[in-house]
Amino acid sequence: MAEKMVEKVTRLMKEPTQVRNIGVCAHIDHGKTTFSDNLLAGAGMMSEQDAGEARKLDFHEDEQERGITIDSAAVSMVHTVEDKEFLINLIDTPGHVDFGGDVTRAMRAVDGAIVLICASEGAMPQTETVLRQALRERVRPILFINKVDRLIKELQLTPEEMQQRFVKQIADVNKIIRGIAPEEYKEAWQVSIEKGTVAFGSAFHNWGISLPYMQKKGVSFKDIIDSYTGTDEEIKEQVKALAKKAPIHEVVLDIVTEHHPDPVEAQKYRIPKLWHGDLESTDGKSLISCDPKGRLFFIITKVVVDPQAGEIAAGRLFSGTMNKGDEVFLNMANSAGRVQQVYVYNGAKREIVDHVPSGNIIGVGGLKAGMPGETVTTGGKAEPFEKITHIFDPVVTKAIEAKKPSDLPKLIDVLRQVQKEDPTITIEINEETGEHLMHGMGELHLEVIEHRIIKEKGVEVKTSPPIVVYRETVTKESPEVEGKSPNKHNKLYFKVEPLEQDVIDLIKEGKLPTGRYKKKDENVIGPLREIGWDTKMAQNVRGERNGNIFLDKTRGIVYINEIMEMVLDMFEDVMGSGSLAKEPCLNMKVSLMDCTLHEDAIHRGPAQMYPAIREGIRGAIMQAGPVLYEPLQVMRIEAPTDYVGEVSKIVSSKRGQLLDMTQEGDITIVKAKMPVGELFGWSNDLRSATGGRGSSSLVDQTFERLPGELQEKIKNQIIQRKGLSQGSLGA
């Protein structure tokens, strides 16, 4: 009797050297989902006729309607190379920048990435972003140049011209890798045709080639060009024959099995970057060696709410074996849980299995409190993995409320579910006022979430027009400001000043860990020493929150360790809503300079300490020249050269500034920095200004000081919108 696919998968899961965990990532519309379909068809998991058409991994209705991938999707399949079977755990990720958070989370689960670029467009802004997300998590890239048929059919390039174009595109990708990869991998992870880490092909027509494959099967570039010459009917038959001779799944998965690391190899260099515990401890050794007999470490990268099965947490098992019925501990939520089901992925289907060893991507049912980024362990509390940080922040907000008051409890449940399913959406639930805010990456992001709440979760809602989230920061050093507890027994003295640019860069590049720090944490002290801080000063840093840091500069205070957690609680609270207009804070350095504390612990509980700390930090901010910063997006705008005048007119009408302008053929590429507040309806305005022929994509996001004349106006607008009284601010 033939072995079932699920039996094959579970058998191979026990052989970590034959497992490859990979992600497919690219700029929007470069063909990822069509490409993933081909890999599934090659593994016999869907019909070849459907491949490239069915878009199997877009199983949400709105993904099929819009023709874009919104959620990452996992699948496990088997690939055979010369009688040796390999298990490929694949994650297909979104390309639209609004859903970039899904890419970041998927990269935590995989060890290798297939980066797709379109042969006619080359490396685009989002290509750089996905490479940055991959390399930050120490994921090794290989390159697939897709849509080669367009060069032959539409652009009618000669083989020499095509070769020149490929050489340039590979050089562009290598330049990005060299700029972002960790020092020891800048050269080792360069992609090249000779090494066999670059493949070409057409996912739509199901064929692909690489240099080793051409040599092995005797396929030449001339064969490919010949396949696209002749009548339409002839081309159709020739392309079919080419897909039989050089099937895309075989070419790509051969590269994956040869050049992507297995979990045992990958965890040797990934764990020291992602886990800050003691590498010499039992846990550390078990993680580095991907030991199935070690302590369980499972990282959740995605939560899906299934109407029948409840919440399913998908993620990577780094150590130990996941068994049905295991008692586990969720380290971020600080709560216990029980594994009710263990699943392996099979496209949109999940297969239930009893247990899975480390090194695999799996689904787990029953972990109610699990959020993406959570570290799940057996045997109680453990050192969690580094928090998953996203490259861009949510900068657009909508207020959302239920149309029927009776739906309010259901809406609150649904919003909590939505935040689990997509942690880049930040949900603020105000139980007192009944106002709920959704913060997202952009208009499309919020539109999709709203659509899902109505369509899939069945709650009728109404939303406000989009609003922009600003940031608060300071411009000078404050004097020491006192915060006094209500019982007058405790006094704390704070100072707030702007954070140095070097430290801001460290946080942005992910070199400084996020969250709270242990005393003398080398991961914190090391990077700060490199930028010139002395060790004593670096040891004072106790925590980071949203790009702000906290220093404890007190000396010889007896009870300081007993109140430090409370101080950090309030530091995080104030950084989440500042003194000017209760907007999040940015680039601040908050220092606790001194304090006098009552010796009796009963007089310095949270009810006394929290108001004192909050009042002290807020007071210091108000004396440090607070200002509002607005979010800006650097856009890459493409339009026919005839429309350049219109493009620059529309950019300046939206308070934007032109950064760069280059011409490629009859297309001009404009780089412009635009305030997010002026970008609502941007794509429609751009289309109408360029006769429907202009397009734009996001390159970078930054915050800059709001022009002086708008400071007061915007501040008052926010205060009014939030219904704040002047008295509640700064206090």
Image: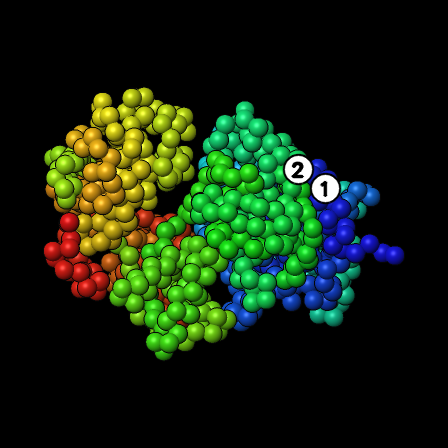
Query: Who is closer to the viewer here, 51 or 639?
Result: 51
The mark tally for this picture is: 2
Label 1 sits on a secondary structure element that is loop
Label ID, residue 534: none
Alpha carbon distance from label 2 to label 1 = 9 Å
Q: As drawn, which residue projects farthest toward the bottom?
A: 404
Query: Which quarter of the rendered picture does the N terminus lie within?
Result: bottom right
Badge 2 amino acid: Pro
Q: Is residue 41 visible?
A: yes
Vertically, is 151 above or below 20? below
Which label sits in the foreground, 2 or 1?
2
What x and y, as percent, mark residue 411? 40, 69
From the image, tell me which residue sits under label 2.
292
Residue occupying image coordinates x 69% and y 53%: 353
Neighbours of disc 1 within 10 Å: few (<14), some (14-19), many (20+): some
Neighbours of disc 2 within 10 Å: few (<14), some (14-19), many (20+): many
Label 2 sits on a secondary structure element that is loop
What x and y, as percent, mark residue 146? 61, 54
Badge 1 amino acid: Lys
* Residues marked 2 and 1 touching at CB (< 8 Å): yes
Colouring mode (rainbow / by chain / secondary structure / one colour) = rainbow
Residue 592 shown left or right of residue 268 in the figure? left
Query: Who is closer to the viewer here, 268 or 191?
Result: 268
